[in-house]
Amino acid sequence: MVVKSSKADKAAAEEAAKQAELQKTVDELRKDVDEEDADHSKASRKSRKSYKKLEDTEADLAQAEARLVQLRGYTTKEAPFENGGAKREKRQAPSEKSGAPVRAAAVLAALAATVTVAMW
């Protein structure tokens, strides 16, 4: 019976050690999660603050544009900032503009012809 109780005690001690190790791991993971949550909250507040600042700046810019149009005396059809103006236009990459690759090729051909003529 002594052998059975010592095996049981040994198994219980091993189980307690495993439980302690698992609890330690759980505590470490909770600490990591809490740190991540704190970082996320901080970043979220910073992001909301930046977005609010952006919205305020855009509102100020819109007011300045309206004031500029008013001071310059533009009519509605002449206003350069009509319908959002140049600052809100979708910008096209040079390759998307009509004729941009053709013009580049023409300039390159003219340059090559000039260099060739200058060499002869």
Image: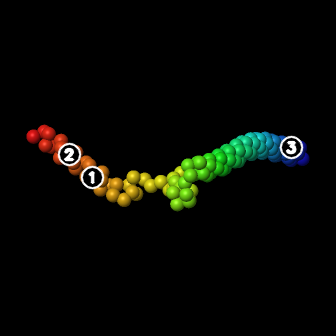
Kindly identify the amino acid type of the residue bearing the numbered disc 3.
Asp
Earlier sequence position, callout 2 versus callout 3: 3
Q: Judge from the rendering whether residue 118 lies leftward or rightward of residue 46; answer left or right.
A: left
Q: Judge from the rendering whether residue 41 lies leftward or rightward of residue 68; answer left or right.
A: right
The residues tagged by marks 2 and 3 sit, at their Cα atoms, a distance apart of: 92 Å
Q: Secondary structure at mark 1?
A: helix
Q: Residue at x 38, y 55 (%)?
A: 95
Q: Which residue corresponds to mark 2?
A: 112
Residue 103 x/y as whole percent: 30, 53
Are the residues tagged 2 and 3 within 8 Å (C-beta)? no
Q: Which residue corresponds to mark 3?
A: 9
Residue 59 x/y as whole percent: 66, 50
Residue sitting nearer the eye, 32 or 22:
32
Earlier sequence position, callout 3 versus callout 1: 3
Q: Is residue 32 visible?
A: no
Residue sitting nearer the eye, 86 or 65:
65
Q: Which residue corresponds to mark 1?
A: 105
Residue 89 x/y as whole percent: 51, 55
Q: Residue at x 18, y 41 (%)?
A: 115
For disc 1, the neighbor class at 10 Å (few under 14, some 14 to 19, many from 20) is: few
In the image, residue 32 above or below residue 105: above
Q: Secondary structure at mark 3?
A: helix
Image quarter hosting the C terminus: top left
Q: Residue furthest left?
A: 120
Residue 77 x/y as whole percent: 52, 60
Kindly identify the amino acid type of the residue bearing the numbered disc 1.
Ala
Q: Residue at x 73, y 42 (%)?
A: 42
